[in-house]
Amino acid sequence: MKRAVLVAAAGAVLGFLAESVHRRAGVWVLTGGGSLPLWIGPVYFAGLLGAVLALARFERRRPGALGRPNLVFEAALLVALFLAPPLLHQHELRLAGLALAVLVARLGLARAPGDVTVALLVAAADLGIEGALVAADLFRYRNASLGPFPLWLAPLWAAMAPSLRRIFAALQR
């Protein structure tokens, strides 16, 4: 549990920093204006802690399913996907297409047992969390043609999920 808390705390700091880049690039805006809100850190912490614990339980049912991941590749892919919205958020279809292409390539070329399930669960969890935050009127996406969400949001989180899974699993060893 201690390691899971440390992973979630480190991820919350990185998430806060990444969201500052997203906000400065105009990916999302605060409904009431102001500076980067402090609630981002605890939301990331809670979400990541839940993900780390859930994935640890998930992996116990599939020992050895992931093999030995290339953590440099996984981290680079995760960073590239997380930085795609600041560059492409004004082009929803392009960003959605990129996220879907990465997801399809990943699942087609390097899928481990359980990756599809994890991708679907991570995308659904993100939509639930972000949906609650948008419904609470804390922020909104600047370019969102799918109600409160941009077209690329669910495919992006689904594409990041296999890398998150491998990184979390490696950090739990």
Image: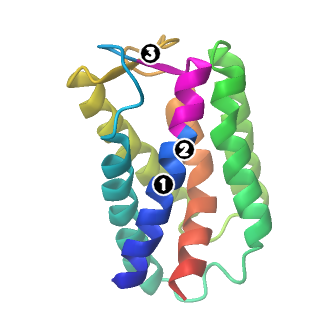
SS assignment at label 2: helix
Magenta-colored segment: predominant secondary structure: helix
> Local crowd at mark 3 within 10 Å, few (<14), some, or many (≥20)?
few
**Residue receiving disc 3:** 146
Distance between the alpha carbons at the discs numbered 2 and 1 = 6 Å
Distance between the alpha carbons at the discs numbered 2 and 3 = 26 Å
- In the image, farthest residue toward the front: 35
- Report if residue 146 lies within the magenta region: no
Q: Residue at x 32, y 14 (%)?
A: 31
Near-viewer residue (41 or 130): 41
* Residues at circles 2 and 3 in contact by the CB criterion of under 8 Å: no
- Amino acid type at circle 1 is Val
Near-viewer residue (16 or 150): 16
Split into 4 quadrants, where in the image is the C terminus?
bottom right
Please say whether residue 113 is visible from this viewpoint. Answer: no
Give the magenta-colored segment's residue range: 19-29
* Residues at circles 3 and 1 in contact by the CB criterion of under 8 Å: no
Checking the image for residue 17, the label placed there is 2
SS assignment at label 1: helix
- Amino acid type at circle 3 is Leu
